Image: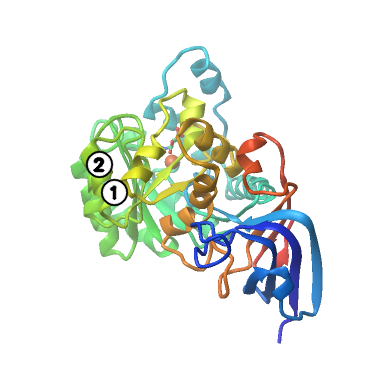
Amino acid sequence: MSSSTVITNIAALVTNDPSLGDGSPLGLVRDAAVVIEGDRVAWTGESSKAPATDNRVDAGGRAVLPGFVDSHSHLLFGGDRTEEFNARMSGRPYSAGGIRTTVAATRAATDAELEAGLTRYLAEALRQGTTTFETKSGYGLTTADESRALRVAARHTDEVTFLGAHIVAPELADDPAAYVALVTGEMLDACAPHARWIDVFCEKGAFDGDQARAILTAGKAKGLHPRIHANQLSYGPGVQLAVELDAASADHCTHLTDADVDALANSRTVATLLPGAEFSTRAQWPDARRLLDAGATVALSTDCNPGSSFTSSVPFCIALAVRDMGMTPDEAVWSATAGGAAALRRDDIGRLTPGAYADLAVLDAPSHVHLAYRPGVPLVREVWRRGVRAV
Ligand code: NIG
Ligand code: FE
């Protein structure tokens, strides 16, 4: 039998189980302990009631929360877009077209270079408390380049997304129908074995609603489950399509009609908000308050990518969401943990209750609220992943 460890003397423990502690969605337990057996949580509750264990770790009166679930990133890429960012901060608007710069650099990169980039950003994210991440292809746009990106990604996470439909490949720019045929045919056949999800950038300059429906439907037929880049730069059909296809998540959700908000609230499709993108493109913030008040499930993620949001920091996104998107600190922490898990249709992560993976972050702070209260401060002191101290 594997040995058991108690992490005790936790001032405030976020469990995300409303039946525990203060009864809020965060299930906040004061003076708490977590017992880990193997890679799973075996027990959580008040430290005075903790069962006996083989090992004991003293959290020193700090806060503990589930590791962040970053359910949206694009980490397989070559090159960088510093100059585009610089120009944007001098007034040039963001458009989907910038993706082409990264496509050229990604095609020119070796497998080893792609993997070295991925592992670097993953290590960066882990140090900031992220214990699960999703990542996508989408900067290759040929059968060979998309499938190799997915193969590299699958060596590092189970949450791999095929995004052949990021933009129309530059060499087929004059024949988008031919590119859709490639993405739904040969490219899908080569990519489906290496992915769990299929995604489409449904936006002006990328794919319209009919093209997105055809691509996601073809993916479903090959056993991939949909998620959509929806309503990021403008109003459009993406959110309604996500709900129609029972997508796990509609991502961005920056420009929403009342009907879009209603559709999300009356579905199990999660609205994943990505404030790093609005920050880095100086765009209007998504209205988290409106979605929450309507009853939608909201996730918060980084969208880490070299074009629109080059941050791997979930704490930074939490701070933005609280300051500018109408979320309370409790809501933002829930969305970055349990919300991310919902956006990946997972119930074994994003919570600290018996049976869940022992993925957690210890903050150098007495409360999870400090993630928003102390923006930009590296508060994550320890990270445990699958029951093992990783940071
Ligand atoms: O999520 N929206 C589409 N894709 C990325 C941006 C990609 C890029 O600019 O390289 C996003 O923001
Ligand atoms: Fe994205």
Question: At label 2, which amino acid type do we have?
Answer: Asp
Measuring 21% from the left and 50% from the top, which residue is drawn there? 214
Q: Quadrant of the N terminus?
A: bottom right
- Residue depicted at x 47% and y 25%: 281
Instruction: Give the left or right position of residue 293, taking residue 117 as reference.
Output: left
Task: Please indicate whether residue 59 sits to the left or right of residue 247 in the image.
Answer: right
Query: In the rendered view, would you say 70 is above or below 322?
Result: below
Which label belongs to residue 264?
1
Q: Which quarter of the picture shows residue 288?
A: top left
The circle on residue 260 is 2
Q: Position of residue 132 (x, y in %)?
A: 56, 57
Camera-side residue of 134 and 37: 37
* Rendered view: 324 above or below 237: above
Task: Name the quarter where the C terminus is drawn.
Answer: bottom right
Give SS at disc 1: helix
Q: Who is closer to the viewer here, 14 or 106? A: 14
The reply to whether dot 2 and dot 1 touch (C-beta < 8 Å) is: yes
Rendered image quadrant of residue 56: bottom right
